[in-house]
């Protein structure tokens, strides 16, 4: 590794500690029940799992914030939870991660929980518990958003379709007016609500649901650029699993091949990608370099179990070896 490369990496590490990221969106608690499977239930043809370990991790937008914080960025999170045991657990987990969590309580909802039952290193079942937050608490959240905008360099809006981003068009407009890049992990088929964003990051399946199928790279390029122009986006990043990721901007296309790694679990990989891009932009990197580093991070995180994070020592070892 050259002296120049070492200096560049250390400079970036210092800038990461000064980066300020605001994450807004749908948070959830990821619960894992681990156990042994030794028999089939006599009541139905399903395995019986004798649970011997329980683990909890921040999920959804909270996992995005956790990834940003793991890279040393000063991270704030704005969302809604229920006034319940899961909400209290999520608050505690975020505190342990060093995240400034602004979580509004909504007594009318339950905190979103994704429960996964794991046996013999395989996921046997996922059960989701969720309700949509009320209008009053969302309006209050918007007021906090305007205040927190002044304290960040980059905004990440993590849309999991749980109702926490009902005011997303207003949030985009406020961020752009304040001169803050706004990155969005989209959900659903109506992308008009993301108009004017700096970057959106759909995966292949999400993009296909919006623009239709493609059978060649040329058709994909045409459809992606047409969508980007129609929505007035600064960029459109398509995450393509084993094919890597492709960034479309005005007059340009950047394709970054996937890192050759063993894939263990892809859950939360999109959270890692958008968090890394957001932190890199906040640290002063350009969009192309931010995408390249996020691609490396994705290659690392899919080799881990469940919703996971990438730390600087893992990520920049890869950068230094390039």
Image (cartoon, grey):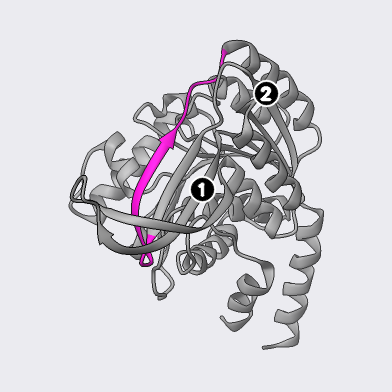
Q: Which residues are magenta?
A: 119-134
Q: Position of residue 206 (x, y in %)?
A: 34, 41
Q: Residue at x 30, y 34 (%)?
A: 210
Q: Position of residue 228 (x, y in %)?
A: 42, 37
Q: Position of residue 27 (x, y in %)?
A: 57, 37
Name the front one of labels 2 and 1.
Answer: 1
Which residue is at the front of the view, 242 or 220? Answer: 242
Which residue is at the front of the view, 8 or 311? Answer: 311
Q: Is residue 74 visible?
A: no
Q: CA distance from mark 2 to mark 1?
A: 20 Å
The answer to whether residue 239 is left or right of residue 59 is left
Which residue is at the front of the view, 134 or 186? Answer: 134
Q: Where is mark 1, residue-wise?
A: 31
| Quadrant in the picture for the N terminus | bottom right
**Residues at circles 2 and 1 in contact by the CB criterion of under 8 Å:** no
Q: Secondary structure at mark 1?
A: strand
Above or below: residue 272 compared with residue 27 = below
On residue 245, the disc is none
Above or below: residue 166 compared with residue 215 = above
* Badge 1 density bin: few <14, some 14–19, many ≥20, Cα 10 Å: many
Mark 2 or mark 1, which has the lower sequence index? 1
Q: Where is mark 2, residue-wise?
A: 105
Q: Residue at x 34, y 49 (%)?
A: 125
């Amino acid at each position: 590794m050259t002296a120049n490369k070492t200096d560049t990496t250390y400079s970036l590490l210092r800038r990461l500690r000064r980066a300020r990221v605001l994450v807004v969106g749908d948070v959830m608690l990821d619960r894992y029940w681990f156990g042994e499977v030794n028999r089939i239930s006599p009541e139905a043809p399903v395995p019986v799992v004798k649970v011997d370990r329980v683990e909890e991790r921040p999920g959804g937008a909270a996992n995005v914030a956790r990834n940003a914080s793991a890279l040393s960025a000063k991270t704030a999170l704005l969302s809604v939870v229920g006034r319940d045991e899961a909400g209290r657990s999520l608050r505690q987990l975020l505190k342990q991660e060093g995240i400034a969590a602004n979580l509004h309580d909504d007594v009318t909802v339950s905190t979103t929980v994704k429960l996964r039952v794991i046996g013999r290193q395989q996921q046997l079942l996922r059960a989701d518990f969720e309700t949509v937050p009320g209008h009053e608490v969302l309006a209050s959240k918007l007021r906090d958003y305007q205040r927190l905008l002044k304290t960040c360099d980059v905004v990440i809006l993590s849309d999991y379709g749980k109702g926490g981003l009902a005011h997303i068009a207003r949030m985009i407009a406020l961020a752009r007016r304040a001169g803050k890049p706004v990155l969005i992990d989209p959900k659903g088929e109506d992308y008009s609500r993301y108009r004017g964003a700096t970057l959106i990051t759909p995966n292949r399946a999400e993009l296909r649901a919006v623009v239709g199928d493609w059978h060649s790279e040329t058709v994909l390029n045409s459809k992606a650029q047409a969508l980007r122009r129609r929505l007035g986006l600064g960029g459109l990043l398509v995450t393509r699993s084993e094919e890597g990721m492709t960034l479309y901007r005005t007059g340009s296309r950047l394709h970054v091949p996937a890192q050759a790694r063993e894939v263990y679990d892809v859950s939360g990989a999109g959270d890692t990608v958008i968090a890394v891009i957001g932190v890199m932009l906040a640290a002063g990197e350009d969009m192309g370099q931010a995408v390249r580093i996020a691609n490396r991070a994705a290659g690392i995180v899919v080799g881990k179990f469940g919703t996971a994070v990438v730390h600087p020592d893992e990520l920049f070892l890869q950068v230094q070896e390039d």
